[in-house]
Image (spheres, rainbow, N blue to C red):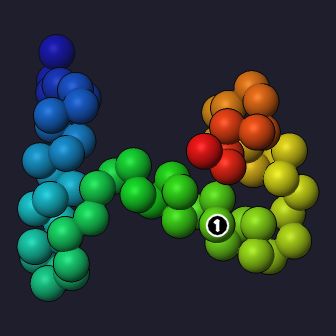
Amino acid sequence: MLFSLSTPTVRRHFTLLLKSLDSPQIHVHDIRHMTATISLESGVPIADVSIGHKDIANLYR
């Protein structure tokens, strides 16, 4: 195997990227919700922005 693409590896590289860009500390999961929020604000239907939830009611919890 050339490299391992495990969750800890992704988190470590993401953290290093943020530090190199002098950006605030955020989690990878935060990007998912930020993308959903921006999509909704841009008029994308909520059913299309369900971010993996089978029931869109889960988005309001």
- Drawn side of residue 46 relative to residue 16, left or right: right
Residue 59 on image: x %, y %: 67, 46
* In the image, residue 47 above or below residue 45: above
Name the secondary structure under disc 1. helix
Q: Which residue lies at the image location 53% right of the left edge and 57% below the top edge?
A: 33
Q: Which residue lies at the image location 21% right of the left edge and 56% below the top edge?
A: 14
Q: Nearer the viewer, residue 46 or 9?
A: 46
Q: Nearer the viewer, residue 22 or 55?
A: 55
Residue 21 on image: x %, y %: 18, 81
Residue situated furthest top in the rendering: 1
- Drawn side of residue 61 relative to residue 32, left or right: right
> Mark 1 sits on what residue?
37
Residue 61 on image: x %, y %: 60, 45
- Quarter assignment of residue 35: bottom right
Q: Which residue lies at the image location 24% right of the left edge and 31% below the top edge?
A: 7
- Drawn side of residue 52 relative to residue 44, left or right: left
* In the image, residue 26 above or below residue 59: below
* In the image, residue 2 above or below residue 60: above
- Quarter assignment of residue 27: bottom left
- Quarter assignment of residue 23: bottom left
Q: Which residue lies at the image location 64% right of the left edge and 59% below the top edge?
A: 36
Residue situated furthest bottom in the rendering: 22
Instruction: Check the picture and name the quadrant holding the N terminus.
Output: top left
